[in-house]
Image (cartoon, rainbow, N blue to C red):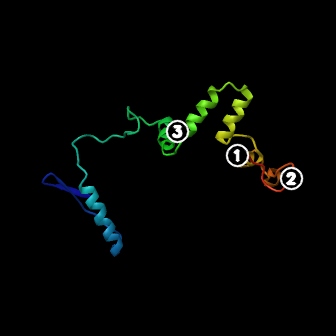
Amino acid sequence: MGYWLDLEWHWVFRWRRDLSVPEIGLLEALLSAVQTTPLLGVVDSWSWRHDSTGTYSVKSAYMVLSAGFVASDLDSLLARVWKSWAPSKVIVLSWQLLQDRVSSRQNLLRRRVIRDPRDSFCAFCGASLESV
């Protein structure tokens, strides 16, 4: 893969075939990116940069993924729903509506509770999927 020469790493690749012109360009871009990475004299280790301890958890991954969405408006709305003086059943239904968790036939089909797509049509009109 390579060798050290005068405290500098030199890559040596052995390819099974000659590289095409686009592949040579990609290899040059890769090598220039790798050459700018400083090498430290420490043992390699795994670390999750999205957690202060460096430890991976599903919770921290969920937080990273959900941070990319514009959820602040929804979060503040959900907080207001839970703090309201409405009856509990209204609060729960409001939360389900905002989270798309109402057990409509469309949602039940998506979650595979209803297996046959024909059973997911509206019970009243029968023309379209029952949704909220």
Q: Nearer the viewer, residue 67 or 39?
A: 67
How crowded pointer 2 is (Cα within 10 Å; few <14, some 14-19, many 20+) is rated as: few
Say few, some or many: other residues with alpha carbon within 10 Å of mark 1 (under 14 / 14 to 19 / 20 or more).
few
What whole-number distance in Å separates the C-alpha atoms at marks 3 and 2? 37 Å
Which amino acid type is marked by label 2?
Answer: Cys
- Camera-side residue: 97 or 118? 97
Q: Quadrant of the rendered structure where residue 34 is? A: bottom left
Q: Nearer the viewer, mark 1 or mark 2?
A: 2
- How far apart in space, not on screen, are marks 1 and 3 (Cα)? 26 Å
Q: Position of residue 50 (x, y in %)?
A: 41, 38
Q: Name the foreground residue: 33 vs 73.
A: 73
Q: Is residue 91 left or right of residue 21?
A: right
Question: Mark 3 belongs to which amino acid?
Answer: Ser
According to the picture, the residue beneath numbered tag 3 turns out to be 72
In percent of the image, x 74 and y 29: which residue is there? 89
- Looking at the picture, tell me which residue is in the foreground, 63 or 81: 81
Instruction: Tell me the kind of residue under disc 1.
Output: Arg
Q: Which residue is mark 2?
A: 125
Residue 32 position within the rendered picture, expressed as x and y whole percent measured from the top left: 26, 60
Tell me: 131 left or right of 21.
right
Label 3 neighbour load within 10 Å: few <14, some 14-19, many 20+: few
The residue wearing badge 1 is 111
Q: Earlier in the sequence, mark 1 or mark 3?
A: 3
x, y (%) of residue 4?
18, 54
**Residue 4 drawn above or below residue 58:** below
